[in-house]
Image (tube, rainbow, N blue to C red):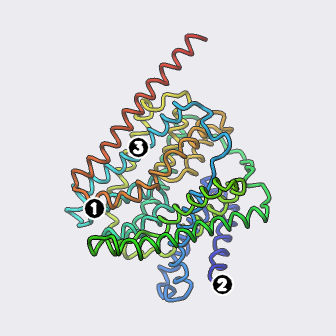
Amino acid sequence: MQYFLLTIFLLGAGAWFGLNSRTMARLRVPPSLFTGVALLLFFTILPTAKEGLFYGHLKSLPAEFIALVFACFFLRKPEPGARTRHGLLQVMAQMSYVWVAVMGQVLLALIATICIVKPVFGFPLAFAALLETGFAGGHGTAVAMGPLLVQNGIAAGLELGLTSATLGLICGIAGGVFFAKRMVPVAPLPTAAMTDAESARLDVNKLLVSLALIAAAYGFGVLLKGVAEQEVLPRLAVSESLKSFSLPLFAYTLVGGIFVNLLCRVSGQQRYIDNHTIMLLGDFFLEVLIFAGIAIIDVRLLAAGLVPLLILCALGLVWNIYCQVHLRKHMLPMPYGEELALINFGMLNGTSAIGLMLARMVDPQFKTPAVQVFAESSALTQPFIAGGLLTLLTPFIVMQFSPVASIAIFAGLLVFWLFFGLATAKRIRRDSARESVSS
């Protein structure tokens, strides 16, 4: 208990520093990131500290807290009036754009891994998953993908994933600010008003009920993992490798979240699912997850994979710039398409928070629907890509299928969403022209 309280104290100290640092506040850098880096430097300078109980406690946190994060994410209920308010076509265009951008990252990384990384550096094809993991996914996704990458032959999967996420964050901030300055002169940011979720007082009953629901989802995931991997697989598996097949706990707690949500809906108790409280707890779990994941990085393991990772990150940055400069003109024809693409640039390189920070630079009052369309489309993309199910399956896909088949799968997804997005954009232009004529 004392080590967990020490973890909370360090995170709280980092949050206090962030609140009192104009730079950190302006860039919206989460306290878990710079606090985790500070603790990483401490363990790197004093490696004997890794022999202590606190370091062992930190190593146990990522696997548990990523399971809690996924339980929270899939436990949420649909918000009233969550249907698109800014037009289905605009949301479909945004969704298609994100799919094309993310599949482009995966495809470029896969081709580079096949042609350069594997023959020159000797890494398996699962190395290609590191680009989407860090850039479109972020630090939370990197921690989640760590065990899966290790399972697919990348010993430093966690370290390389977190490094990719950090590089992506830097590229997102630097590149995004560059594009924002070209769009409009950057004015001093106004003091952001607290949202209802941030300013509302927590209700103790809602907090306890939300914790109970999260615990139920987590417990169901633990039960499901035990039944699936200790009872079902050993009896049904035809090979020894399949009998020992194991998925991380979070793969089961997300099912637990869906199950508890469904149970509440069927029993008429869904009113007790409070999204604001659950997401507040989810944000807290994510902060602990990122902090612990960064703090336990073994810097020595980065040496062998750093150069090929930089190659992938360079390709990813070039692709994201291409999407921002050229592709968005064809796929996001809305009047606010440039602002929406800027949010996407921040998300595709770093996190959604970086994208929103960039949006505030060019649209301080959020007068355009860009943020709303981005949020509404995220509900349709995040469960699958940029940290979703397809992201988690990517290492297994590229390892189980031949290189040609793997390229065909991701290229097929890219081409499908590209043509779908271009067709949607064409219809948006036609509807806009019709409205202009009628007015």
Identify which residue is drawn at 53% across, 65% down.
253
Task: Confirm or deny contact between disc 1 and disc 2 (CB under 8 A).
Answer: no
Q: Residue at x 57, y 38 (%)?
A: 373
Crowding at mark 1 (Cα within 10 Å: few <14, some 14-19, many 20+): some
Q: Amino acid at mark 1?
A: Met
Residue 81 position (above or below residue 244): above
- Quadrant of image for the N terminus: bottom right
Q: Name the outermost residue toward the left.
A: 119
- Taking the image as shown, residue 158 lies to the left or right of residue 368, namely left
**Neighbourhood count class around disc 2 (C-alpha, 10 Å): few under 14, some 14–19, many 20 upward:** few
Q: Which residue is mark 2?
A: 2
Q: Which of these two is toward me, 59 or 305?
A: 59
How far apart, in angstroms, are the residues tagged by discs 3 and 2? 44 Å
In the figure, residue 129 lies in which quadrant? bottom left
The kind of secondary structure element at disc 2 is helix
For disc 3, the marked residue is 101
In this rendering, would 38 be left or right of 242?
Answer: right
Q: Position of residue 419 (x, y in %)?
A: 36, 32
User: Considering the numbered disc 3 on the image, is that residue within a helix, a strand or a loop?
Assistant: helix
Q: Position of residue 299 (x, y in %)?
A: 41, 74
Compared with 426, 246 (above or below) is below
Amino acid at the residue labelled 2: Gln
Q: Residues within 10 Å of mark 3 (few under 14, many from 20)?
A: many
The residue furthest top is: 438
Left or right, 13 with respect to 375, comes to: right
Q: CA distance from mark 3 to mark 1?
A: 23 Å
Looking at the picture, tell me which residue is in the foreground, 25 or 195.
Answer: 195
Residue type pointed to by label 3: Ala
Q: Nearer the viewer, mark 3 or mark 1?
A: 1
Q: CA distance from mark 1 to mark 2?
A: 42 Å
Q: Which mark is residue 399?
A: 1
- Secondary structure under badge 1? helix
